[in-house]
Image: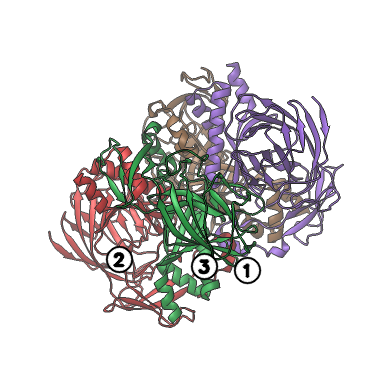
Chain colours: A purple, B brown, C red, D green
Amino acid sequence: MATHHFQPTHYHNTIGSHPPVLHIKDGDTVVTTAIDARGQDMHGQVIGPRPNPMTGPFYVEGAEPDDTLVVSLDRIYPNRDQGWSSGILAGVVVEPEYVPLLPPVEQRIVTWRIDRAAGTATLDKADTKLGDNFSLPLKPMLGCFGVAPADGQAISTATSGEHGGNMDYRGFVEGVTAYFPVFVPGALFHLGDGHAIQGDGEISGTGIEISMDVQYTVRVIKGKKIGWPRGENADYIFTAGNARPLDQATQHATTEMARWLEEDYGLDRIAIGILMGKCIEYDLGNMYDPAYTMICKLSKRILENIARG
Amino acid sequence: MATHHFQPTHYHNTIGSHPPVLHIKDGDTVVTTAIDARGQDMHGQVIGPRPNPMTGPFYVEGAEPDDTLVVSLDRIYPNRDQGWSSGILAGVVVEPEYVPLLPPVEQRIVTWRIDRAAGTATLDKADTKLGDNFSLPLKPMLGCFGVAPADGQAISTATSGEHGGNMDYRGFVEGVTAYFPVFVPGALFHLGDGHAIQGDGEISGTGIEISMDVQYTVRVIKGKKIGWPRGENADYIFTAGNARPLDQATQHATTEMARWLEEDYGLDRIAIGILMGKCIEYDLGNMYDPAYTMICKLSKRILENIARG
Amino acid sequence: MATHHFQPTHYHNTIGSHPPVLHIKDGDTVVTTAIDARGQDMHGQVIGPRPNPMTGPFYVEGAEPDDTLVVSLDRIYPNRDQGWSSGILAGVVVEPEYVPLLPPVEQRIVTWRIDRAAGTATLDKADTKLGDNFSLPLKPMLGCFGVAPADGQAISTATSGEHGGNMDYRGFVEGVTAYFPVFVPGALFHLGDGHAIQGDGEISGTGIEISMDVQYTVRVIKGKKIGWPRGENADYIFTAGNARPLDQATQHATTEMARWLEEDYGLDRIAIGILMGKCIEYDLGNMYDPAYTMICKLSKRILENIARG
Amino acid sequence: MATHHFQPTHYHNTIGSHPPVLHIKDGDTVVTTAIDARGQDMHGQVIGPRPNPMTGPFYVEGAEPDDTLVVSLDRIYPNRDQGWSSGILAGVVVEPEYVPLLPPVEQRIVTWRIDRAAGTATLDKADTKLGDNFSLPLKPMLGCFGVAPADGQAISTATSGEHGGNMDYRGFVEGVTAYFPVFVPGALFHLGDGHAIQGDGEISGTGIEISMDVQYTVRVIKGKKIGWPRGENADYIFTAGNARPLDQATQHATTEMARWLEEDYGLDRIAIGILMGKCIEYDLGNMYDPAYTMICKLSKRILENIARG
């Protein structure tokens, strides 16, 4: 159960079977950093290539294909005082007739002052009707993280899949435990793309992009095979489906939840149909990246009531 | 500001320019009832045809095309002690490979005991691993309501569109104010399809279907033209996009919210891009009916902060 | 086997259970006319309302729900010398990024000279780089035709469904036999929306819109229930799936073809999988209307070879 | 203009920046072979890994990012006497309700006798109602070919994208010239996945899979940047859009055709809207792989008429 302090010196724009930067063991914790989507570090210096440069990969001893890698997100917090975001809705989230009404691209980027002590982001003078001190509470998250995919693929950090990747789900915050299917020996965990705040769907194409301090702890579940990324927080278990269009992303997330309930909670399929039909919730992770992300959630409290019978 | 007590004697399976059952005025309140999706009334008697038989239409004096009809849902509450629901996930919400694993159709329907005093629904003996006393808190809602569409159309209550209809959104509960574009003189408001409880997406194809006591109050906003159904509750303003696939439903809801923020909140499009990009939320209304429903929500508290500058 | 000459005096913008304009018998032929999508007749006079005003409905004696109506398109030919079309690609058929590059709406409509003797359409002076005498051979077709839908619906002639409607498939030309499921007594056949020429997908939102002389002959297949419109020409049998998105339209067309091969050609499902996998063809009917249309085709020659064994 | 005879000794399951197997020059011809989708060579021996093992990559001297690689498919012909195919429609191409009716997986694979002299494929005894001598004319094609993608990606040969890949379009036959955007120095051309015959859409998930003799000739167009694969044959120019869902694949193909007509044929956008609206054709490449492929085609004869004015 060692704690490793790791300072990256290079970054990857794909998630793949790259040479590991560190070997860690089941139960170990890593304290590291992630630069922002454009490669800017805690000083605002560009030290990595676009898009979404990844810290890692980390080789987890003992993780083998068809195991599950468990990643506890112990800490995700901005490590600098300025973030940036897009100020324009993405073309894919509006009606085609509305696309020509979107502002011109040169107005795209706005900057935010991050007050880490107060836990707020305040819009820099943007000459908009939001006013000069438009401020929001921080909710720091990781946009892109996951494990090396199968078959020697190296998948762009612009997109996501069964291996995780650029899911851009606002719910991947500190305190969440994420689960990934393992496709290669060592799992090869990558992380990056911090957002100080993001709405559902990442519909303007960015969160408030910022570099992060990150701490995580890994576990390996031997012989446990899952199909898509899963997660849990204090209140919910959830699954992530990553695909276009949203219909398909939703199908993957829903099916993965049904499998989870059957395999790990011992429910039969009628029970699953009844339970999910009445109690399921969805979050729209992103509707911007090449693969969209839909999250399927179920309340832990309801599951506990069932377990108690 | 009269209050009308209206007991329906016939029902419609389309939303259209049917002869009105009652003329009401701007500000009036109607106390009425809705039978369930299969036409069963408060006594469990089948008195109307499938699917989703509608009470109404109600002719609202003064409502003209390109006005907005405002409907406050004052009360929506079950008026009998038994509901029913499907126990099988819909084919469209799971991966194609999972469809053959769904239970056979003869196991589709389960029944629930509704304890109106306690505010709970309890599953009747269903021989599932949910246990014999699986119980959930009531959250009564209307699945299908709206106004007559344009051009003489009579649109099936199985589906939805700009006129509202079978949106099956769990958020249309008591206390919500809904807004509809008016397409015909009198607006011709229809309502029905009560659900005692429903999950996001109505992914098993039903809520807990039940007959309802309904009370609503209407207002007309003259000369206010909207594109899609809108709503608000204590915490949010929201818009509904009704279309297949989910991508398109999301585009309609998102665009309607952008228009709302521009027209009624005076925001410029950069402000809208920033605000929606960081603060928007989505609810999956339904992913089962011929048109899916996606809801785009924005927190009223954030809007109030902006208004205060 | 009478031949009826019918001159319409009013038109419908929905396909529904309207009062029939004429009762005809199994085997009868009707000689009639259709005005164009904007209601212009053979003299260019606007005599009907937009969109796609329908001639009919025609009540076919003996047609009952779950029968099939057979419509032989004996003649479809322009009855005036000018047509019009859009000159701008639709927003839904291009990438969102390309939408702002589309020409402004005021340049939308161009006109064409129709030489009925020569069988050509020639672009009127349009100040484009196509040149002043850009000419194409006529291939006259019906964009919108079908039968009254079920459940009292009146469906806009802007869209399509199981009942047919605005399929805008360039293959519905003279010589084709179309098959429709019957939902109401008399089937209630409607027709209109002639196009002198149209590309696959109707991707600029129109064909060359023109009024038509139309002659058709009906038959009723008693007790034969089909799910979606079907057709045949000299070379192919085909099915039409009408839905959004294209994926779903394709699923309906493909499934309907599989059912056809099983029911009427006696093929088992492995045979169907092999045959369709190697020999099927698709035409993109339209990707513009609220419901898109995909056509699934199979060569009659191949089917005849199979029948001969 | 050398001719290289190249016999592969290893194969790749991704298209990426792998070490080149051969350096060739602009104008050179390569005579080589491709093993089938399961890695079987001309003797039926499995010598490469699934899925779709690629011959190559070939480094084309002088090809740089933002150039276009031109590949003339000089010869594509089976080099053995047996092929295999699936006998079951894919779940994604049928209605969800039909999926449980598909035959069981153990009946999936059927074999075909390939008579190369006669140019026919004949189904081996398959115990289906197609009969024992069901035979089709060969139309040999390449399912998967393309160039290394950008940003260090290694993309699975199960799917496709801007770089080409597993497009599974029945039109990529001998005599076709294909165009690919170049993303890396040398372009790094890969090829494989021969099909003796395939229907539109590859809707049973395979063609008749077979190993091939392949001959191709390359050219480089310096400084010519294209967005998606293009092609031409004797009658058409065409573009390929590779994405899910079909709507998006169609948008890419249509937009790429519009750009082509503007850049290389000097047409203005009104001319393009008119021309494409009346004359465009689509082929459904595949609706099975992770990215679907839609082909947008325009007749060369029409383009020649325009050029002559």
Q: Within 10 angstroms of label 2, few (less than 14), some, or many (20 or more) residues?
A: few
Q: Nearer the viewer, residue C174 or A117?
A: C174
Residue C145 drawn at (x, y percent): 31, 59
Residue B264 drawn at (x, y percent): 65, 57
Q: Within 10 angstroms of label 1, few (less than 14), some, or many (20 or more) residues?
A: few
Chain of the residue where label 1 is placed in the rendered structure? D
Q: How far separated are the C-alphas under marks 2 and 1?
A: 60 Å
Q: How far separated are the C-alphas under marks 3 and 2?
A: 40 Å
Q: Against B135, is C154 above or below?
A: below
Q: Which residue is mark 3?
A: D258
The label on residue D223 is 1
Front position among marks 3 and 2 = 3
Q: Quadrant of residue C118?
A: bottom left
Front position among marks 2 and 1 = 1
- Residue reaching furthest to the left: C1
Q: Are marks 3 and 1 on the same chain?
A: yes
Chain of the residue where label 3 is placed in the rendered structure? D
* Circle 1: residue type: Gly
* Circle 3: residue type: Ala
Q: Is residue B223 visible?
A: no
Chain of the residue where label 2 is placed in the rendered structure? C
Image check: C170 left or right of D225? Answer: left
Q: Against C68, is B107 above or below?
A: above
* Circle 2: residue type: His
Q: Nearer the viewer, residue D251 or B209?
A: D251
Q: Against A155, is D183 above or below?
A: below
Image check: D182 left or right of D199? Answer: right
Which residue shows up at 58% across the image and 23% down it? A264
Q: Which residue is mark 2?
A: C10
